[in-house]
């Protein structure tokens, strides 16, 4: 495909992504897969170029553009090479005119700015939309960092976390034997630090609420040396179903899954009331800390959706707290940097529950945010997270 035709293809794909974000449709990744499945004539270089163009526009605009053409038109005003591709050729986009609409705005939606902590300056905000690295967690149940580094000389150790390694972005690790044999798992170093803040030990009883497909469950199982009780609970059947085979591959024999019905969680976990040494809440959230991986999710967020997710986080914390034994711990985490989901949520919980106090999560990264810690791409090289460790008195 000629470069102009690639740009026209990116415009078509981006229009689909814009419509899906507006109407609650499929994710950008799913739309891109379907787009290329329907265009077998596009070779691998074409696909990469079309994807890069499309994602550069998604990253560039915090507010959802009205049309893909208006987004690329605005970008072309600052990029002569891109502007030259609006050449009016067969399969290429029509020539740009000075009076046609241009998308406006910066890399994050204006309405979100007031929700971000003050310490996020311009450099921090730009890094929220940067390129995400590829991090691995070495599974202590099956391997060691030294063994993995010998097999993967491209990997570098990360000082923040004992089991964390970083690979060059795009490294084809998915089908590598280390992955299929459960010796390593793909996991951002921030997620690994959240699991570390649980200080899981052999023989403990740990409840991983909001376990999803079990990324953090498997890290906890490794910290427990595979010994003790580890319950992975979630309301999403499909996600939880992925955990069984993953746990088997990882040699994590102490994982038990429990599917919960929304609003009946406390009753369905009543056998663990007051029993858990640690409850991890990896809460559903706006995902603002992972915009660099899923930049189009900021086009789906609005104040009413944010309000609903904040209310759900508070409700989950209330029932989760009942599962913790006296002197036990609650670790609360979100992959978001919005204060209302992090420090604000913890402040409210502590004021409504005087029998709890905050503790230092004692990890080797992050900065204080209220009674917890935030990790950011710019400061910590991780995805954006908030975490807090609370103790029941
Ligand atoms: C951030 S994701 C979890 C990611 C996962 N812990 C991991 O490390 O890969 C949040 C999860 O919370 C689950 N969830 C949402 N509402 C819930 C509820 N009321 N109780 C338990 N889980 C819930 C969602 O289904 C989703 O899987």
Image (spheres, rainbow, N blue to C red):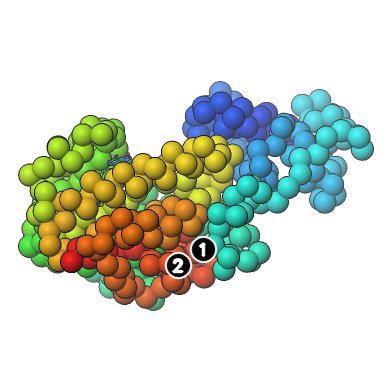
The secondary element bearing badge 2 is classed as: strand
| Image-quadrant location for residue 91 | top right
**Which quadrant does the N terminus fall into?**
top right
Location of mark 1 (residue): 377
Q: As drawn, is 368 to the left or to the right of 66?
A: left
- Please tell me which of labels 1 and 2 falls first in the chain: 2
Q: CA distance from mark 1 to mark 2?
A: 16 Å
Q: Residues within 10 Å of mark 2 (few under 14, many from 20)?
A: some
Q: Secondary structure at mark 1?
A: helix
Quarter of the picture containing the C terminus is bottom left
Instruction: For ligand 1, tell me if the residue under mark 1 lies within 8 Å.
Output: no
Q: Residue at x 70, y 37 (%)?
A: 65
For residue 123, above or below residue 237: below
Of 184 and 44, nearer the camera is 184
Position of 160 with respect to 181 (left or right) is right
Name the one closer to the observer, 238 or 116. Answer: 116
């Amino acid at each position: 495909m000629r470069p102009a035709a690639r740009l026209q293809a990116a415009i078509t794909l981006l229009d689909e992504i814009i419509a899906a974000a507006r109407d609650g449709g499929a994710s950008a990744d799913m739309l891109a897969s379907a787009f290329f499945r329907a265009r077998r004539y596009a070779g691998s270089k074409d696909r990469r170029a079309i994807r890069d163009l499309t994602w550069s526009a998604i990253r560039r605009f915090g507010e959802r553009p009205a049309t893909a053409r208006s987004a690329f038109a605005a970008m072309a005003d600052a990029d002569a090479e891109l502007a030259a591709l609006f050449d009016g050729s067969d399969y290429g986009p029509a020539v740009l005119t000075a009076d046609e609409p241009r998308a406006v705005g910066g890399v994050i939606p204006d309405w979100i700015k007031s929700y971000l902590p003050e310490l996020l300056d311009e450099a921090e905000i730009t890094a929220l939309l940067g390129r995400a690295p590829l991090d691995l967690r070495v599974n202590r149940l099956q391997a060691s960092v030294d063994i993995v580094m010998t097999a993967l000389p491209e990997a570098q150790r990360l000082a923040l976390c004992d089991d964390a390694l970083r690979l060059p972005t795009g490294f084809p690790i998915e089908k590598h034997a280390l992955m299929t044999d459960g010796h390593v798992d793909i996991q951002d170093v921030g997620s690994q630090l959240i699991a570390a803040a649980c200080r899981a030990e052999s023989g403990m009883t740990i409840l991983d609420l909001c376990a999803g497909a079990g990324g953090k469950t498997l890290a906890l199982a490794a910290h427990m040396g595979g010994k003790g009780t580890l319950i992975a609970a979630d309301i999403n059947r499909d996600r939880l179903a992925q955990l069984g085979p993953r746990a088997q591959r990882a040699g994590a024999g102490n994982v038990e899954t429990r599917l919960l019905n929304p609003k009946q969680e406390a009753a369905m976990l009543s056998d663990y009331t007051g029993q858990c040494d640690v409850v991890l809440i990896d809460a559903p959230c706006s995902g603002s800390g992972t915009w660099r991986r899923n930049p189009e999710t900021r086009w789906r967020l609005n104040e009413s959706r944010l309000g609903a997710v904040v209310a759900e986080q508070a409700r989950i914390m209330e029932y989760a707290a009942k599962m913790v034994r006296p002197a036990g711990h609650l670790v609360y985490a979100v992959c978001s940097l919005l204060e209302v989901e992090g420090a604000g949520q913890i402040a409210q919980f502590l004021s409504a529950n005087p029998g709890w106090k905050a503790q230092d999560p004692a990890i080797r990264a992050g900065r204080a945010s209220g009674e917890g810690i935030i990790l950011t791409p710019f400061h910590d090289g991780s995805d954006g997270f908030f975490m807090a460790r609370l103790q029941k008195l």
